[in-house]
Amino acid sequence: MHKIEHVFFDLDHTLWDFDKNSALTFEKVFNTHKVEVNLSDFLSIYEPINLNYWKLYREERVDKSSLRYGRLKDTFDGLSYRIDDELIHLLSEEYITYLTSFNHLFEGTLNILDYLEKKYQLHIITNGFEEAQNRKMTNAKIIHFFKTITNSEMVGVKKPNPLIFNFALESAKAKPASSLMIGDNYEADILGALNVGLDVILFDYHKTETTNGIKKIDSLLELKQYL
């Protein structure tokens, strides 16, 4: 991949270990408000519901407030746990507040960013909420690695919309032919980037995707095989 000059990363589920940090956040807010649910049972229902809400959010079928409330409401309903709407709204707000106080990164993140920074210009393209993403990178001590950070709220569209990739390329003064996108979401990160001419690598840490010949890794340090 000798032609690559710019490497664009997704943040959540790619560098920042969203599932681990999210679980710790729920544990904190549930203990604070004495929400008596088994955390493992809650997460087993919540995680697929959350992924579906993010898909709806990418497709402009729900807004931010509906996502934040709906994913909790649907999970508690799935658990048959009685809870009033006022507490659900409070939990959703405190979840966002405390989420960035936990900053576990995927294994190898600092190592690979330090390695790549010496050879490439590094950038972020994220669909995550603007108010949280910079705090995540700052608190996790990785924000200094990135020349540009493109957020969907800043652009007004979300991955896989080509406008967000074009905005990120323009901000980075990068050409598609010399750029690479690395992310965990096949639809948003991989197909979205391919559609505007970037090379791609799928971070398939769950080892679940069939990628039709697209390069994929399940450990970030495997990027050294390509870059």
Image (cartoon, rainbow, N blue to C red):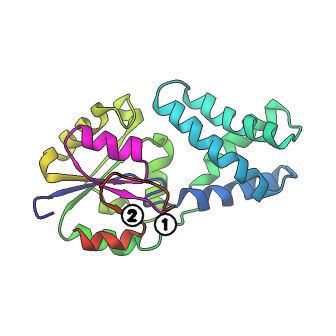
Q: Earlier in the sequence, mark 1 or mark 2?
A: 1
**Are the residues at dot 1 and dot 2 in contact (C-beta closer than 8 Å)?**
yes
* Residue at figure coordinates x 49%, y 42% from the top left: 131
* Number of residues whose C-alpha sits closer than 10 Å to that of mark 2, classed few (under 14), some (14–19) or many (20 or more): some
Between 17 and 29, the residue placed more toward the observer is: 17
Depicted 129 relative to depicted 143: above or below: above
What are the residue bounds of the magenta stretch? 181-205
Residue 174 in view here: no
Which residue lies under the disc numbered 2? Answer: 142
In the image, farthest residue toward the top: 61
Query: In which quadrant of the rendered image does the N terminus lie?
Result: bottom left
Between 63 and 101, the residue placed more toward the observer is: 63
What distance separates the C-alpha of mark 1 from that of mark 2? 10 Å
Query: x and y percent of residue 171 in the render?
Result: 21, 42
* Residue at figure coordinates x 53%, y 31% from the top left: 56
Residue type highlighted by circle 2: Ile
Dot 1: element? loop
Which residue lies under the disc numbered 1? Answer: 105
Is 225 in the magenta? no
Residue type highlighted by circle 1: Leu
